[in-house]
Amino acid sequence: MRITGTGHASMRIDTAAGSILCDPWVNPAFFASWFPFPDNSLLDWETLGDVDYLYVSHLHRDHFDAVHLKKYINKKATVLLPEYPTSQLEDELRDLGFTSFLRTKSDEVHELDGGLKVMIQALISPTDGPIGDSSLWVEHDGIRVLNQNDARPSDLSRFNELGHVHAHMLQFSGAIWYPMVYELPQNAKTAFGKQKRERQFDRTWRYIDDLKADFVFPIAGPPCFLDDELWQFNDIHGDEGNIFPDQSVFMTEYAKVGGTNGVVQLPGSVTVLTDGGTKQTTTHPTPVDEFFANKKQHLEEMRERKRPVIEAEKASWRHPEVDVLGELKKRIEPLLEESIFMAKGVGGPVRFDLVSYDGDEVESIVVDFPGKQVRAYADEKVRYRFRTQRELIEHLIFIDEGDWVNSLFLSCRFSAARIGQYNEFVYAFFKCLSEERLQYAEGWYDEHEKAVDAEDTEFGDWTVQRRCPHLKADLSRFGILDGNTLTCQLHGWKFDLPSGRCLTSVGHKIRAEKKA
């Protein structure tokens, strides 16, 4: 089996029974904020795109690159489609010209021609990617590979059931806007960022330990930020709170916990697995250590090369003809009327401060969840506030974007403030700005609230429900007790056991009882 690194979460898997291209991403994503690092735009994509199978894990734009898919990927390739609750991924791929689809069943092995076997595990909560995320398991001639990319399954037991995995590809770096965009003192940002960075690595070590693969490949990050306005987010400034460590940092941190089987791939690196998957040889287009030693230089060169791309994108965002308040009322108010669980979960108004083109004026608009309306800000107290450029909202309206998380928020082109805890319902709602997505999310929260998990696990003097109230992670594996505070390492949620109260977000009370 041959695995060619093609950048970020992308790879091409070649076997005697066929080839699979995974998540090809080349063009900038999220308002030209994210670029793949190292740069993969100079690879021979005409050749790489001539494959038998295409796997797109989910619709995040650093995995689903519509421009690249349309231009370079063989339209005769069979798409290995995760079992998602909505048809949006298939619909968008059909619009790009793909016609052959294998609609997989989650957690079921599918045997393709020539003895090639695949299994896709689909995650389908409203907080998994844009209504879904997934992992791809591949087996051929006794060699097994798991491309977990940036999916966060509650456990990896299903993959272990299928036999020992030889190569494990997984995310280790950040892919979020927290804490950089929050209006906090710098020392607080650094402290929160350091916690986030450590939590990312802790979660990665747990997944690696779960699977115990022969070889571990750090993938799906970090992105790089080439716009001058976002340059500070690159991990080249000696900031211990930066949440975007690169592959060389992974290797250093992995060694600290005893890891000796890490394999870094640059775009164009080729790994060949032999001896039943227990041996690997990897060749690189340039020495890995040398590349990362010159990281800043590579980024600066890439910034100059991509500057025209960024400027062209920026020029397309402004739509002064759009009546922002009127259009938001038209689009969001019907969804507010139908929202029960998410509206209750948000529990108050959310304010957007829109800064004019010249920066001199600010229009404040409120999405009032209890009042079920979108209106001008009336000088009231709000718990959640976002500040961004007006043209970004104009563009979201102009393109009829149904997922502001997969556009505005991941762009980091905003600032945020809140009173109190993180509230997942705020972001879940703005991920679901379409009838289909809203109805699915509302139904999911309804069923989730009804579900009663009777299994228990023990932490010191406490008996606690085994499944995390957030997304049902197994706390017997992901839980860490510090005093009376239980932390679920899968997503970093914290619970006060004496009261059962969630310390991280609104709701999600945990069932806990102190032993007699």
Image (cartoon, rainbow, N blue to C red):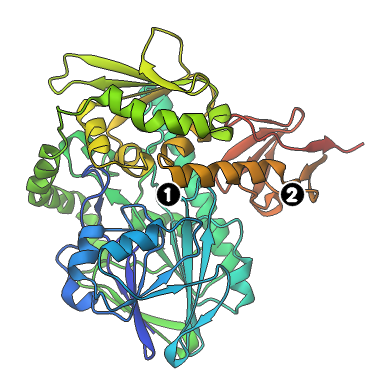
Give residue 466's mark. Answer: 2
Give x and y (percent) for residue 428. 48, 39
Kindly report the distance in space between the C-alpha atoms of the residues bearing marks 2 and 1. 27 Å
Relative to 234, 371 lies left or right? right
Report which quarter residue 506 is drawn in: top right
Residue 443 visible (yes or no): yes
Identify residue type, mark 1: Pro
Most foreground residue, 3 or 377: 377
Observer-side mark, 2 or 1, equals 1
> Image quadrant of residue 391?
top left
Helix, strand or loop at mark 1: loop
Q: Nearer the viewer, residue 339 or 418?
A: 339
Q: Is residue 339 above or below residue 304?
A: above
Q: Residue at x 63, y 67 (%)?
A: 157
Classify the position of the C terminus by image quarter: top right
Residue 10, position as x, y percentages in the image? 32, 65
Say left or right for 160 vs 169: right
Please tell me in which quadrant of the rendered image residue 179 appears.
top left
Q: Residue at x 57, y 49 (%)?
A: 490
Query: Which three-letter amino acid code belongs to the residue tagged 2?
Result: Arg
Q: Which of marks 2 and 1 is nearer the N terminus?
A: 1
Mark 2 Cα within 10 Å, few/some/many (few <14, many 20+)? many
Tell me the quadrant of the picture where the N terminus can be found.
Answer: bottom left
The residue at 58%/28% (across/down) is 344
- Mark 1 burial class by Cα count in 10 Å: few <14, some 14-19, many 20+: many
Identify the residue at the far right of this view: 516
Instruction: Residue lying at the far top in this picture: please name it.
Output: 379
Q: Mark 1 points at which residue?
A: 130
User: Where residue 177 appears, x then y in whole percent?
Assistant: 37, 37
138 relative to 93, above or below: below
Q: 278 or 100: which is nearer to us? A: 100
